[in-house]
Every structure is written in C-alpha cells, then in structure tokens.
Amino acid sequence: MKFGPDNHEESCSQGHSSASTIATIKAALSADPDIDSSAIEIRMLGPVVLLEGYITNTADREKAIRLAAMIVGPENVQDRMLSRFPTQ
C-alpha cells in the first residue's frame, strides 16, 4: 500500500491507512479496563469510523465513542452499537 496524496481514498487525512486506524482504536478500547469492548466491531467507511456490535451498558457506549473520537475526531465517528443489557 502506498501512502500519500496519490492514494488518498485509502488513507485518512494524516496519511494512516484504514487498517492502522482500526488497529489503533481497537488497542485503545482494549487498553481501557473500564470498558467491555469484546463485542464492539470497528469498520471504516471512507474517513468515518463505524462502531458496531453490542454494548452492555451506557457508559461503555460513551467511552467507546470518546476514545474513537480522540483518534479520528468526533465528526468522523458513527455509533451503530446496539444495547444488550444483562437481565436480572
């Protein structure tokens, strides 16, 4: 893969590939001990990060969105996560 202006469609504005952006977000989610990210999937649609899958509480949703926004900017995060709250 070639980075730079000739391959802009496959890279973000900073020159990172979609794969490295996804890996960075996954690593940030995994590193946070207060979030259960095991059922969160991350995909890219152009410059937009799609957070999909399931969360078990509202705090996890907010943390996942916040972490992704720190990496790609809040305007580039799309929340498609579904709530799966444990039954008691």
Image (tube, rainbow, N blue to C red):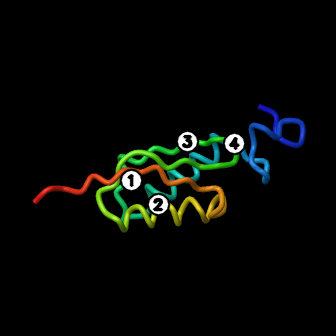
User: Are discs 1 and 2 less than 8 Å apart at CB?
Assistant: yes
Per the image, the residue denoted by label 4 is 46
Side (left or right) of 6 relative to 1: right
Per the image, the residue denoted by label 3 is 43
User: Are discs 1 and 4 less than 8 Å apart at CB?
Assistant: no
Per the image, the residue denoted by label 1 is 37
Q: Earlier in the sequence, mark 4 or mark 2?
A: 4
Q: Earlier in the sequence, mark 3 or mark 2?
A: 3
Check the image and name the residue furthest to the left.
88
Residue 50's disc is none
Residue 76 position within the rendered picture, expressed as x and y whole percent measured from the top left: 65, 56
> Label 3, label 2: how many angstroms apart (C-alpha)?
13 Å
Q: Amino acid at mark 3?
A: Arg
Q: Earlier in the sequence, mark 1 or mark 2?
A: 1
User: Are discs 4 and 2 less than 8 Å apart at CB?
Assistant: no
Q: Amino acid at mark 1?
A: Ser
Element marked by disc 2: helix
Q: Amino acid at mark 4?
A: Gly
> Label 1, label 4: how many angstroms apart (C-alpha)?
23 Å
> Label 3, label 4: how many angstroms apart (C-alpha)?
10 Å
Q: Nearer the viewer, residue 62 or 2?
A: 62
